Image (cartoon, rainbow, N blue to C red):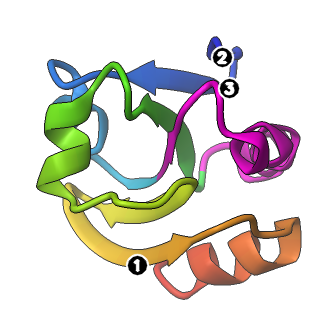
Amino acid sequence: MAGSDLIKILTDATFDEGVAGGVVLVDFYADWCGPCRMLTPVLEELAQEMVGKVTVVKVDTDQSAQVAGKYEVTSIPTLILFKDGEMKKRVVGLKDLDALKQLINEVL
């Protein structure tokens, strides 16, 4: 699952820098995960609607097991919201656009 123009893929090597500034929503996913694939268009819409407010990124748990382990990601999709590098909120499972906006607005 490749990134789009609005959603970048982070790895073990790029994760800390990728969440260091501003509000960042991280989607921990795997290509084989059905609910993860269903979440992708929701995240793309969210990224488009909230440009300048939140950055949406993805982490492939199969490729970046170190960062997935660090944040105790045991089920996917797991969404973790960071603000200036600090974990603020965490939700597990498929969420709709309104639920994600509400989550982000609690941190903005």
The label nearer to you, 2 versus 1, is: 2
* Residue that extends furthest to the bottom in the rendered view of this protein: 106
- Identify the magenta region: 26-52
N-term mark: 3 or 1: 3
| Quadrant including the N terminus | top right
Judged left or right of residue 39, residue 33 is: left
The question of residue 49 being in magenta is answered with yes
> Is 66 left, or right, of 54 in this rendering?
left
- Element assignment for label 3: loop
Q: Secondary structure at mark 1?
A: strand
The nearer-to-camera label among 3 and 1 is 1
Q: Position of residue 29 (x, y in %)?
A: 53, 40
Label 1 crowd bin: few (<14), some (14–19), many (20+), radius 10 Å:
some
Q: Which residue is mark 3?
A: 6
Name the residue type under label 1. Lys
Q: Is residue 46 magenta?
A: yes
Name the front one of labels 3 and 2: 2
Circles 3 and 2, Cβ within 8 Å, touching? The answer is no
Provide the residue designation for mark 1: 89
**Mark 3 near mark 1, Cβ–Cβ under 8 Å?**
no
Q: Are marks 2 and 1 in contact (CB under 8 Å)?
A: no
Q: Against 36, is 31 above or below?
A: above
At label 3, which amino acid type do we have? Answer: Leu
Q: Which residue is mark 2?
A: 1
Residue drawn at x 47%, y 21% is 9
In the image shown, does 71 or 9 lie closer to the viewer?
A: 71
Which of the marked residues, 2 or 1, is nearer the chain's N terminus?
Answer: 2
Q: CA distance from mark 3 to mark 1?
A: 21 Å
Q: Is residue 41 left or right of residue 43?
A: right
Distance (Cα) linking label 2 and label 1: 24 Å
- Three-letter amino acid code at disc 2? Met
Q: Quadrant of residue 13?
A: top left
